[in-house]
Image: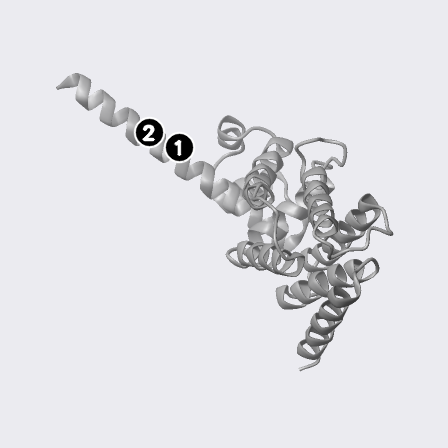
């Protein structure tokens, strides 16, 4: 019996510890999302989370480590989307990926905005890190372009890495405007899709270019409505 009681007590303590950690991280996201990165101090976080600063240190560490926790979770979730195989019609591939990305962000906009803002300010989105968001997103863009060329959708007159950089740049610029509250998610989606389709149109075979142009026009009309 004593052993079982001790085990139950250990489980309860672990659960309480996890709840406190989640509450602290939730408060950190809220502070960044509503007041900005610089507003996140341990004193403010302790006050909002109703814990002491030593408790924050014990559970999560310093401010930099708290930021790493916030960003790490987001990177993992986006990484799952980036890991899926690319193939088929490039328009469908881009639309599907963009829809899934927007759905992910829409599930908790405050969380993702806070994580992106914090990650950029803390320089955690290192461009040269092989497993980082930048390099994995670039690899996805390269795969899309290479597959499109192999299947005749693109002419191959422009180098794959140039097209890939522009595809990624379109998404990154729209994300920046969204996370800084300049645009909403619907505008984000339209900008990403129309931007990517415009990039592909620069090297598209005639029939594919017509389809891309049609998609761009439709997106423009939807934006105006």
Q: Is residue 50 visible?
A: no
Residue drawn at point x = 53 percent, y = 30 percent: 60
Against 146, is 198 above or below?
A: below
Against 136, is 108 above or below?
A: below
Which residue is label 2 attached to?
13
Q: Secondary structure at mark 2?
A: helix
Residue 198 drawn at (x, y percent): 79, 63
Residue drawn at point x = 60 percent, y = 54 percent: 97
Dot 1: within a 10 Å radius of its alpha carbon, few (fewer than 14), some, or many (20 or more) residues? Answer: few
- Quarter residue 218 falls in: bottom right
Q: Farthest right residue?
A: 157
Dot 2: within a 10 Å radius of its alpha carbon, few (fewer than 14), some, or many (20 or more) residues? Answer: few
Which residue is label 1 attached to?
17
Q: Secondary structure at mark 1?
A: helix
Q: Is residue 187 visible?
A: yes
Against 222, is 144 above or below?
A: above
Verify CB contact (< 8 Å) between mark 2 and mark 1. yes
- 161 lies left or right of 26: right
């Amino acid at each position: 019996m004593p052993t079982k009681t001790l085990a139950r007590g250990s489980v309860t303590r672990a659960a309480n510890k996890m709840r406190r950690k989640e509450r602290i991280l939730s408060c950190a996201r809220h502070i960044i999302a509503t007041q900005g990165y610089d507003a996140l101090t341990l004193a403010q976080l302790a006050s909002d989370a109703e814990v002491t600063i030593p408790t924050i240190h014990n559970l999560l560490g310093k401010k930099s480590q708290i930021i790493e926790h916030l960003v790490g979770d987001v990177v993992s979730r986006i990484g799952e989307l980036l890991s899926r195989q690319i193939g088929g019609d490039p328009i469908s591939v881009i639309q599907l990926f963009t829809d899934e990305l927007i759905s992910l962000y829409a599930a908790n906009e405050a969380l993702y905005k806070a994580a992106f803002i914090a990650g950029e300010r803390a320089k955690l989105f290192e461009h040269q890190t092989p497993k980082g968001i930048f390099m994995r997103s670039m690899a996805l863009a390269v795969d899309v372009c290479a597959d499109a060329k192999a299947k005749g959708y693109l002419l191959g007159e422009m180098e794959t890495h140039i097209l890939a950089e522009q595809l990624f740049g379109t998404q990154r610029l729209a994300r920046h405007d969204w996370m800084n509250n300049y645009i909403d998610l619907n505008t984000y989606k339209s900008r990403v899709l129309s931007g990517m389709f415009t990039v592909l149109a620069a090297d598209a075979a005639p029939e594919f270019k017509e389809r891309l142009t049609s998609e761009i026009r439709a997106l423009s009309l939807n934006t105006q409505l």
